Amino acid sequence: MSGHSKWHNIQKTKGAADAKRSAAFTKIAREIIVAVKEGGSGDPNNNSRLATVIAKAKAVNMPNDNIKRTIDKALGAGNTDSYEAVTYEGYGPGGVAVIVEALTDNRQRTAPEVRHAFDKCNGNLGAIGCVSWSFDKKGVIVIDNEEGELDEETVMMDALDAGAADFEADGPALEITCDPDAFNDVVKALEEKGYSFVNAEVEMVPQNYITLSSEGDVKNMQKLIDMLEDSDDVQNVWHNWSQD
């Protein structure tokens, strides 16, 4: 089976984010709070959005104690944290399509930060919908097989049995994709079979990729990603830049 093979495109930026583990945990905690408040439950079995965020948290090794503490905080009567989801779209250098997902308690702070990053890196912030049409929302699960201990055929069959739509062996990474609505069921079924993940979340997956030939564009694009990811309000940065 063939897939969109995107893991190699985010490995570098994923590694940079993982190096800032504390900041990554803080951002996921914000997602957990929103999921609990909007879902009205701290039980992932009764709150599908919370289940999705917990899968993401586990994939980056967020301790279970941290997850539970954050859920308890969100359920607390005195908790006044209030965040809204905001999405920004635009073009990076060389016409790279970029989607920025944020959770913020102050749009007047977040919007200028995002706009400044685009302006600083030779990009352009556009209107909602200007690039999202070229992305598909998919559940993406990545299993590390660097040691070669897993049989690819077995993983593929287990993934398909769990309800996955596609499977691809991308070097040491075994990448599974599924419909977003099936994501939690696929994750749960694979976890029950003993698999652990290095990535597990619902993502905006590009329909095509752009390769940058200019060294200046490459530097600016990496700087744009770094500036956006360094923002406390930005949760995810999706793009169609191929870094091969």
Image (spheres, rainbow, N blue to C red):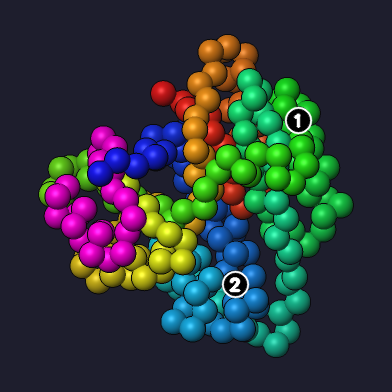
Q: Which mark is residue 124?
A: 1
Neighbor class of circle 1 (other Cα within 10 Å; few <14, some 14-19, many 20+) is: many
Magenta-drawn segment: 152-172
Q: Nearer the viewer, residue 28 or 64?
A: 28
Q: Secondary structure at mark 1?
A: strand
**Residue 166 lies within the magenta run:** yes
Residue at position x 49%, y 56% in the image: 202
Where residue 160 sits, quadrant-wise, is bottom left
Q: Secondary structure at mark 2?
A: helix
Task: Give the CA separation, mark 1 to mark 2.
Answer: 31 Å
Give percent across and percent down for residue 61.
Answer: 40, 58
Q: Nearer the viewer, residue 103 or 202?
A: 202
Can residue 151 be seen in the rendering of this structure? Answer: yes
Q: How many marks?
A: 2
Residue at position x 36%, y 70% in the image: 185
**Residue 72 lies within the magenta run:** no
Give percent across and percent down for residue 128.
Answer: 74, 46
Q: Which residue is mark 2?
A: 35
